Image (spheres, grey):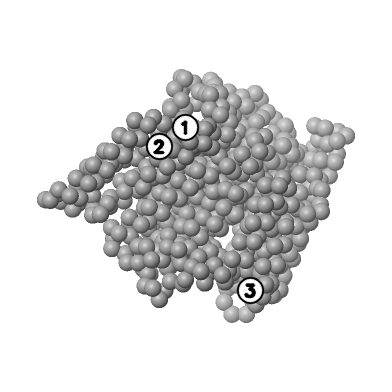
Amino acid sequence: MAENQMETGGEKTLGQKVADIVVAVIAIGMALFHLYAASLGAFTPYFQTSIHWAFVGAYIVITRPLKFPGGKIIDILLVLINIFLSYYQLVLQDKAIRYAGIYTPMEVYIAIAAVIVTLLIAWRVVGTILPVICIVFIAYGLFGYHITGMFHTGRFSVQRLFTDLYANVSSGMYGQTLYVSAQFIFIFVLFGCLLELTGAGEFFVDLAFSLTGKTRGGPAQAAVFSSMLMGTINGSGAANVVTTGTFTIPLMKKVGYKPSMAGAVEAVASSGGQIMPPVMGAVAFLMSEITGIKYSRIALAAFIPAVLYYITLSATVYFSARKDNIPAAEDAQIKKIGAVFKAGWLYFLPLVVLITLLINNYSVKRSAFFAIIATLIVGFIKNRANMTPQKLLKALKSSVEGIAAIAAACILAGIVMDVINVTGLGLKISGIIIGIANGNLMTALILSFLTSLLLGMGLPTSAAYMILAVLVAPALVKMGITQLAAHLFILYFGALSTITPPVALSTFAAAGIAGAGMWSTGRDAIKLASTGFIIPFVFVYYNALLFEGPIGLIIWAAVTAAIGCVILATSVIGWAGKNLHFIVRIILFPCAVLLFTTPLLFNLAGFGVAFTAIAVYNLVPGLKKRS
């Protein structure tokens, strides 16, 4: 938090006290503005994004100050300039109604300054990679006409490109990508922080532990399901890791999980929340806006694949505990499920309110607003001691901290998307995928999978999805894939990019809490999320997993795929009654894949071979116990 980042020990200086006051004003002002916008306000998108970034940009600079002499002056100037640039965005849009596309030389300089200041501010919270990518894309927009071949572009002047980056409210910096942060994601981050304040996070952990505590690796199972519940609300897997992970990771280590495995479980569970209905980290609402598909249809289609993802994660956690002889929790440590539910059932009320309003066609922001009101009511009923002004302020600060990296990534993603649109790069990349695939759908899917992982690295899921929806999804649709399947495909790999090295935000955060190595945690995370890398390929070919087709076929597909998930977990971990020889593990992997496919014969063959391999290995004496 801000006060922790600025405090250097001992009594705070006057400057630090002033910074704390400013941060408090930002947190309160930002919460009130977005709550008003979600309930009574009817703001234009560019107005909401401008105010949103003015708040977030100021917060980033104040909480991450420059440390060298003269740094404070630069910070103050950056904050003031950013506020002016956000304000002038409003002036420019009002002017554009009368003089569209006509800019004065001063406005061109303002646009250039806006890009530079945005890069400098965002760099403080998202790191180096994404700003460098933006600079590369800007350079491509300016100098791409020198390139020959498919990537050749028209000639764009500095004036044309930078004014478009600044003033285009469709695909520029203040365009659709930042609007998603301002319109959807922040209100859900605020919802999650207030829900955590009420004690709901602890309740979800207790509830999950009471349900799973008697199984091997109970704390890890608790981490899986509590992180799933909080992760679907949160707009960032990494942000969810640093909240629920502070409870679950130490608990997993305490019962015997290796630090890397404890971190991997939390990272995979938190990132999976981005694909779990009903909220899907707010991406479901974004997908609905981009595709025109109803939210309810998207949430329904995402349900079975998300459940399969967590079945595999839960099974791998259990098999890992058995393989490493991690004991179940003692009875004295496990609270009775009835007592836990009786004490905390009211914490489900905000989620019920949210889902009920969404189903009844209330707008997303209005539904989130009433869910927040329900959360505050529950907080005053269940945990009045936490609902003090000081703790409420701390929750508001946490919400701004939670949105900071997301908003910064979104505004930078706007730069990338605008260059893509101006230069026509999106059509070119889609053309490249289709051209290389040469009519082969699997080749197109593999190329899209690799592109999604690459472009999603370092981005929150929502920002990654928006870029991929422009670059990759059109190619898949042209290859004959349904629009829903294509967009869910890229969403999965955009979400999984947060656990995939080398730039894995969720894995990095979890490894830090666990005290484990980044690469070892990443390796374990990929093993645990194995179904997430397979299921998208399956539902492209087998739409029954997206709730399409006869109900009997949907049920059969779900059941056989669930069995396949367990077999896949057995193969990945290497345990089924005893440690499995690597040859048995190799045999089990294709068996699991066969259970995800359509033909009944394939399903029966996969199950039969897997059952036989495990039974023979366990029953025939003399076979070595070797993993």
Q: Which residue is mark 3?
A: 383
Q: Earlier in the sequence, mark 1 or mark 2?
A: 1
Query: At which x and y percent is residue 500?
Result: 44, 47
Q: Disc 2 marks which amino acid?
A: Phe
Q: Earlier in the sequence, mark 3 or mark 1?
A: 3
Q: Which residue is mark 2?
A: 596
* Residue visible at 34% across and 32% down in the picture: 602
Q: Which residue is mark 1?
A: 542
Q: Looking at the image, which residue sits at the far bottom?
A: 11
Does the image show residue 296? Answer: yes
Q: Is 597 in front, or is 175? A: 597
Looking at the image, residue 124 sits to the left or right of residue 270; the answer is: right
Crowding at label 2, few (<14), some or many (≥20) Cα neighbours within 10 Å? many
Find numbered disc 1 in the image and state the secondary structure of the residue it sits on: loop
Contact between labelled residues 2 and 1, with CB atoms less than 8 Å apart: yes
Find numbered disc 2 in the image and state the secondary structure of the residue it sits on: helix
Q: Disc 3 marks which amino acid?
A: Asn
Q: Disc 1 marks which amino acid?
A: Tyr
Which of the 4 image quarters holds residue 17?
Answer: bottom right
Q: Gap in Å between the C-alphas at discs 2 and 3? A: 45 Å
> Which callout, 2 or 3, points to the residue nearer the camera?
2
Find numbered disc 3 in the image and state the secondary structure of the residue it sits on: loop
